[in-house]
Amino acid sequence: MIEVMPAIMPHSFADLAERAGRVADKVPCVQIDVMDGRFVPSVDWPYTSESAQKEFAELVQGERSLPFAEKLGYEVDLMVFEPERVVADWVATGVGRVIVHIESSEYLAAARVSVRVAAEKCGRPVEFGLALNTTTDNAALDPYLAHVDFVQFMGIEKIGYQGQPFDERVLGKIRDLREKRPGVIISVDGGVNFVSAPRLIEAGANRLVSGSAIFESNDITAAVRKLQHA
Protein backbone atom coordinates (compact mmCIF):
# COMPACT_ATOMS: atom_id res chain seq x y z
CA MET A 1 0.00 0.00 0.00
CA ILE A 2 1.12 3.55 -0.69
CA GLU A 3 2.36 5.31 2.43
CA VAL A 4 0.85 8.76 2.99
CA MET A 5 2.50 11.21 5.37
CA PRO A 6 1.13 14.56 6.48
CA ALA A 7 3.71 17.34 6.13
CA ILE A 8 4.04 19.78 9.02
CA MET A 9 5.85 23.11 8.70
CA PRO A 10 5.75 24.06 12.37
CA HIS A 11 5.72 27.69 13.42
CA SER A 12 6.51 26.56 16.96
CA PHE A 13 6.77 23.42 19.07
CA ALA A 14 3.20 24.01 20.19
CA ASP A 15 2.12 24.17 16.54
CA LEU A 16 3.94 20.90 15.85
CA ALA A 17 2.14 19.30 18.79
CA GLU A 18 -1.26 20.59 17.69
CA ARG A 19 -0.90 19.33 14.13
CA ALA A 20 0.62 16.03 15.18
CA GLY A 21 -2.30 15.54 17.53
CA ARG A 22 -4.75 15.93 14.65
CA VAL A 23 -3.22 12.97 12.78
CA ALA A 24 -1.73 10.82 15.55
CA ASP A 25 -4.48 8.19 15.32
CA LYS A 26 -4.80 8.38 11.54
CA VAL A 27 -1.30 7.78 10.11
CA PRO A 28 1.80 5.93 11.26
CA CYS A 29 4.27 8.71 10.40
CA VAL A 30 4.46 12.44 9.73
CA GLN A 31 7.10 14.59 8.07
CA ILE A 32 8.50 17.67 9.80
CA ASP A 33 9.67 20.25 7.28
CA VAL A 34 12.60 22.20 8.74
CA MET A 35 13.77 25.43 7.06
CA ASP A 36 16.68 27.57 8.19
CA GLY A 37 16.24 30.64 5.96
CA ARG A 38 19.52 29.90 4.18
CA PHE A 39 18.93 26.94 1.91
CA VAL A 40 15.38 28.18 1.32
CA PRO A 41 14.04 31.68 2.14
CA SER A 42 11.41 30.46 4.59
CA VAL A 43 12.15 29.92 8.28
CA ASP A 44 10.29 27.70 10.71
CA TRP A 45 10.79 25.94 14.03
CA PRO A 46 13.36 25.46 15.51
CA TYR A 47 15.08 28.36 13.72
CA THR A 48 12.46 30.97 14.62
CA SER A 49 13.80 32.16 17.98
CA GLU A 50 16.16 31.50 20.88
CA SER A 51 13.34 29.87 22.82
CA ALA A 52 12.67 27.55 19.87
CA GLN A 53 16.34 26.60 19.82
CA LYS A 54 16.10 25.86 23.54
CA GLU A 55 13.09 23.60 22.93
CA PHE A 56 15.03 21.74 20.28
CA ALA A 57 18.04 21.36 22.59
CA GLU A 58 15.74 19.83 25.20
CA LEU A 59 14.57 17.30 22.61
CA VAL A 60 18.15 16.44 21.69
CA GLN A 61 19.09 16.01 25.35
CA GLY A 62 16.05 13.85 26.07
CA GLU A 63 14.45 16.36 28.40
CA ARG A 64 11.29 16.38 26.28
CA SER A 65 9.87 14.13 23.56
CA LEU A 66 8.40 14.65 20.14
CA PRO A 67 4.61 15.01 20.42
CA PHE A 68 2.68 11.72 20.52
CA ALA A 69 5.93 9.79 20.00
CA GLU A 70 4.36 6.75 21.64
CA LYS A 71 2.03 6.31 18.68
CA LEU A 72 3.48 8.40 15.86
CA GLY A 73 6.69 8.05 13.87
CA TYR A 74 8.57 11.01 12.46
CA GLU A 75 10.74 11.80 9.50
CA VAL A 76 12.47 15.15 9.14
CA ASP A 77 13.02 16.93 5.83
CA LEU A 78 16.03 19.17 6.41
CA MET A 79 15.74 22.08 4.02
CA VAL A 80 18.82 23.59 5.64
CA PHE A 81 22.29 24.60 4.52
CA GLU A 82 25.03 22.11 5.45
CA PRO A 83 22.71 19.53 7.04
CA GLU A 84 25.69 17.40 8.07
CA ARG A 85 26.04 19.81 10.99
CA VAL A 86 22.64 18.95 12.48
CA VAL A 87 21.63 15.45 11.35
CA ALA A 88 22.97 13.76 14.48
CA ASP A 89 20.95 16.09 16.69
CA TRP A 90 17.79 15.22 14.79
CA VAL A 91 18.46 11.51 15.20
CA ALA A 92 18.78 12.15 18.94
CA THR A 93 15.29 13.69 19.01
CA GLY A 94 13.81 10.31 18.04
CA VAL A 95 13.05 10.69 14.33
CA GLY A 96 13.11 7.48 12.29
CA ARG A 97 14.03 9.01 8.93
CA VAL A 98 16.31 11.89 7.98
CA ILE A 99 16.13 13.59 4.57
CA VAL A 100 18.80 15.94 3.26
CA HIS A 101 18.69 17.82 -0.03
CA ILE A 102 21.34 16.97 -2.58
CA GLU A 103 21.72 20.66 -3.45
CA SER A 104 22.30 21.72 0.17
CA SER A 105 25.82 20.45 0.79
CA GLU A 106 29.08 19.24 -0.69
CA TYR A 107 29.39 16.73 2.14
CA LEU A 108 26.44 14.40 1.71
CA ALA A 109 28.55 11.35 2.53
CA ALA A 110 29.43 12.96 5.86
CA ALA A 111 25.74 13.53 6.56
CA ARG A 112 25.00 9.86 5.87
CA VAL A 113 27.82 8.71 8.15
CA SER A 114 26.66 11.05 10.91
CA VAL A 115 23.15 9.61 10.72
CA ARG A 116 24.47 6.05 10.89
CA VAL A 117 26.76 6.77 13.86
CA ALA A 118 24.03 8.63 15.73
CA ALA A 119 21.57 5.80 15.07
CA GLU A 120 24.03 3.25 16.42
CA LYS A 121 24.53 5.41 19.50
CA CYS A 122 20.76 5.55 20.04
CA GLY A 123 20.42 1.81 19.42
CA ARG A 124 17.76 1.99 16.74
CA PRO A 125 17.63 2.06 12.93
CA VAL A 126 17.24 5.41 11.17
CA GLU A 127 16.62 5.69 7.44
CA PHE A 128 18.62 8.15 5.37
CA GLY A 129 17.06 9.73 2.28
CA LEU A 130 18.15 12.19 -0.37
CA ALA A 131 15.81 14.83 -1.79
CA LEU A 132 16.10 16.21 -5.30
CA ASN A 133 14.63 19.36 -6.84
CA THR A 134 12.72 19.26 -10.12
CA THR A 135 15.51 21.29 -11.73
CA THR A 136 18.31 18.93 -10.66
CA ASP A 137 19.21 16.11 -13.04
CA ASN A 138 18.68 12.58 -11.71
CA ALA A 139 22.32 11.83 -12.54
CA ALA A 140 23.26 13.76 -9.39
CA LEU A 141 21.92 10.79 -7.42
CA ASP A 142 24.23 8.23 -9.03
CA PRO A 143 27.14 8.43 -6.53
CA TYR A 144 24.79 7.97 -3.59
CA LEU A 145 22.04 5.53 -4.57
CA ALA A 146 23.85 2.49 -3.18
CA HIS A 147 24.06 4.18 0.23
CA VAL A 148 20.61 5.68 0.75
CA ASP A 149 17.37 4.09 1.95
CA PHE A 150 15.08 6.15 -0.26
CA VAL A 151 14.84 9.11 -2.61
CA GLN A 152 12.46 12.03 -2.20
CA PHE A 153 11.54 13.94 -5.33
CA MET A 154 10.19 17.43 -4.87
CA GLY A 155 6.93 17.90 -6.75
CA ILE A 156 7.16 21.69 -6.84
CA GLU A 157 9.81 24.04 -8.18
CA LYS A 158 9.73 26.53 -5.31
CA ILE A 159 10.42 24.40 -2.24
CA GLY A 160 9.76 25.48 1.31
CA TYR A 161 6.19 26.63 0.74
CA GLN A 162 2.99 24.63 1.02
CA GLY A 163 0.27 25.01 -1.59
CA GLN A 164 2.64 25.49 -4.53
CA PRO A 165 1.54 24.31 -8.00
CA PHE A 166 2.46 20.79 -9.09
CA ASP A 167 5.54 20.58 -11.34
CA GLU A 168 4.94 18.11 -14.18
CA ARG A 169 8.67 17.46 -14.53
CA VAL A 170 8.65 15.25 -11.45
CA LEU A 171 6.68 12.55 -13.29
CA GLY A 172 9.49 11.97 -15.77
CA LYS A 173 12.06 11.98 -12.99
CA ILE A 174 10.13 9.29 -11.11
CA ARG A 175 9.76 7.11 -14.21
CA ASP A 176 13.44 7.47 -15.03
CA LEU A 177 14.61 6.40 -11.57
CA ARG A 178 12.02 3.62 -11.31
CA GLU A 179 13.23 2.17 -14.61
CA LYS A 180 16.88 2.31 -13.57
CA ARG A 181 16.36 1.22 -9.96
CA PRO A 182 13.17 -0.88 -9.77
CA GLY A 183 13.54 -1.58 -6.05
CA VAL A 184 14.22 1.92 -4.77
CA ILE A 185 11.70 3.59 -2.47
CA ILE A 186 10.51 6.84 -4.06
CA SER A 187 8.79 9.52 -2.02
CA VAL A 188 7.25 12.70 -3.41
CA ASP A 189 6.82 15.91 -1.43
CA GLY A 190 5.14 19.04 -2.75
CA GLY A 191 2.14 19.41 -5.01
CA VAL A 192 0.67 16.13 -3.81
CA ASN A 193 -3.12 16.31 -3.98
CA PHE A 194 -6.07 14.26 -5.16
CA VAL A 195 -5.38 15.13 -8.80
CA SER A 196 -1.63 14.57 -8.85
CA ALA A 197 -1.54 11.51 -6.56
CA PRO A 198 -2.80 8.96 -9.14
CA ARG A 199 -0.25 10.21 -11.66
CA LEU A 200 2.57 10.02 -9.13
CA ILE A 201 1.64 6.48 -8.15
CA GLU A 202 1.36 5.43 -11.79
CA ALA A 203 4.82 6.87 -12.42
CA GLY A 204 6.26 4.75 -9.60
CA ALA A 205 6.05 6.62 -6.29
CA ASN A 206 5.82 4.57 -3.06
CA ARG A 207 5.32 7.38 -0.57
CA LEU A 208 3.30 10.57 -0.80
CA VAL A 209 3.89 13.56 1.46
CA SER A 210 1.08 16.11 1.57
CA GLY A 211 0.34 19.12 3.71
CA SER A 212 -2.50 21.18 2.28
CA ALA A 213 -4.59 18.30 0.91
CA ILE A 214 -4.66 16.69 4.34
CA PHE A 215 -4.77 19.54 6.84
CA GLU A 216 -7.20 21.65 4.83
CA SER A 217 -9.60 18.73 4.50
CA ASN A 218 -12.75 18.54 6.60
CA ASP A 219 -12.12 14.82 7.09
CA ILE A 220 -8.44 13.97 7.55
CA THR A 221 -9.02 10.22 7.66
CA ALA A 222 -10.93 10.29 4.38
CA ALA A 223 -8.27 12.51 2.79
CA VAL A 224 -5.48 10.11 3.74
CA ARG A 225 -7.42 7.11 2.43
CA LYS A 226 -8.22 8.91 -0.81
CA LEU A 227 -4.53 9.62 -1.38
CA GLN A 228 -3.56 6.05 -0.46
CA HIS A 229 -5.98 4.53 -2.94
CA ALA A 230 -5.61 7.14 -5.67
Image: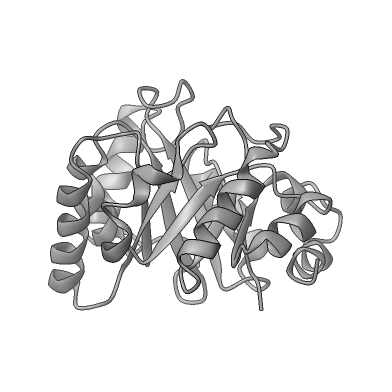
Q: In this rendering, would 151 be left or right of 85?
A: right
In the rendered image, which quarter contains the C terminus?
bottom right
Considering every residue shown, the one lying at the far right of the view is: 218
In the displayed structure, 172 sits above or below 98; it is above
Percent position (x, y) of residue 212?
72, 44
Image height check: is 181 above or below 190?
A: below
Q: Is residue 146 visible?
A: yes
Q: Residue at horizontal 18%, vertical 41%?
A: 107
Is residue 18 something one can see in this rendering?
no
Q: Position of residue 102 (x, y in %)?
A: 34, 41
Q: Residue 146 or 208: which is nearer the viewer?
A: 146
Q: Is residue 194 left or right of residue 52?
A: right
* Image side of residue 93 versus residue 42, left or right: left
Residue at x 29%, y 31% (from the top left corner): 81
Q: Position of residue 202 (x, y in %)?
A: 73, 63
> In which quadrant is the N terminus drawn?
bottom right
The mark tally for this picture is 0
The image quadrant of residue 204 is: bottom right
